[in-house]
C-alpha cells in the first residue's frame, strides 16, 4: 500500500486565529524561538500498491476540488509518502 500526503494551508492574507492562539501560548510554555505560527491541514490518501504518476495526478485534482477551499487556502504540497515518514520519529506520536 502506498500513501500520498496533501498539505493545505490558509492563504497568507487570511487571518489564522488558531495559529495566533498557539503563537501566544508558545512563549508562556518556554518556547520563545518562534515568531509566527500558521495552522494547516494534512491529508493522507492510501492507494493499493505503489504510488503512480496517475495517483499523484488524481490526488492533485482532489486537493484542488475537494480537500481545499481555493478562496482561502493554498495546496502547498502533494507528494508520495516515503516509508520513513510512515513511522513516527522516536519520542513523537502521530
Image (tube, helix red, strand yellow):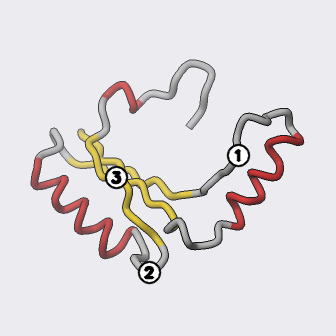
- Which quadrant of the figure contains the C terminus? top right
Q: Which residue is mark 1?
A: 35
Identify the mark nearer the N-term, 1 or 2. Answer: 1
Rounded to the nearest angstrom, the CA distance separating label 1 from label 2 is: 26 Å
Q: Nearer the viewer, residue 3 or 40?
A: 40
Tag 2 secondary structure: loop
Q: Which residue is mark 3?
A: 77
Residue at 24%, 59% (x, y): give it. Answer: 59
- State the mark number for residue 71: 2
Question: Residue 10: x, y in percent?
Answer: 52, 66
Q: Nearer the viewer, residue 86 or 72?
A: 72
Identify the mark nearer the N-term, 3 or 1. Answer: 1
Tag 1 and tag 2, C-beta contact below 8 Å: no
Identify the mark nearer the N-term, 2 or 3. Answer: 2
Tag 2 and tag 3, C-beta contact below 8 Å: no
Residue at 26%, 42% (x, y): give it. Answer: 80
Residue at 10%, 55% (x, y): give it. Answer: 54
Q: Nearer the viewer, mark 3 or mark 1?
A: 1
Question: Residue 90: x, y in percent?
Answer: 56, 18
How many residues crowd around disc 1 within 10 Å: few (fewer than 14), some, or many (20 or more)? few
Amino acid at each position: 500500500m502506498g500513501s500520498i500526503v496533501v498539505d493545505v494551508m490558509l492563504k497568507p492574507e487570511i487571518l489564522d486565529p488558531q495559529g495566533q492562539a498557539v503563537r501566544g501560548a508558545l512563549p508562556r510554555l518556554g518556547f520563545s524561538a518562534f515568531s509566527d505560527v500558521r495552522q494547516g491541514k494534512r491529508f493522507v490518501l492510501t492507494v493499493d500498491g505503489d504510488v503512480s504518476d496517475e495517483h499523484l495526478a488524481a490526488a492533485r485534482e482532489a486537493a484542488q476540488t475537494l480537500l481545499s477551499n481555493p478562496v482561502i487556502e493554498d495546496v502547498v504540497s502533494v507528494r508520495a509518502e516515503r516509508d520513513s515518514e510512515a513511522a513516527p520519529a522516536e519520542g513523537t506520536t502521530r
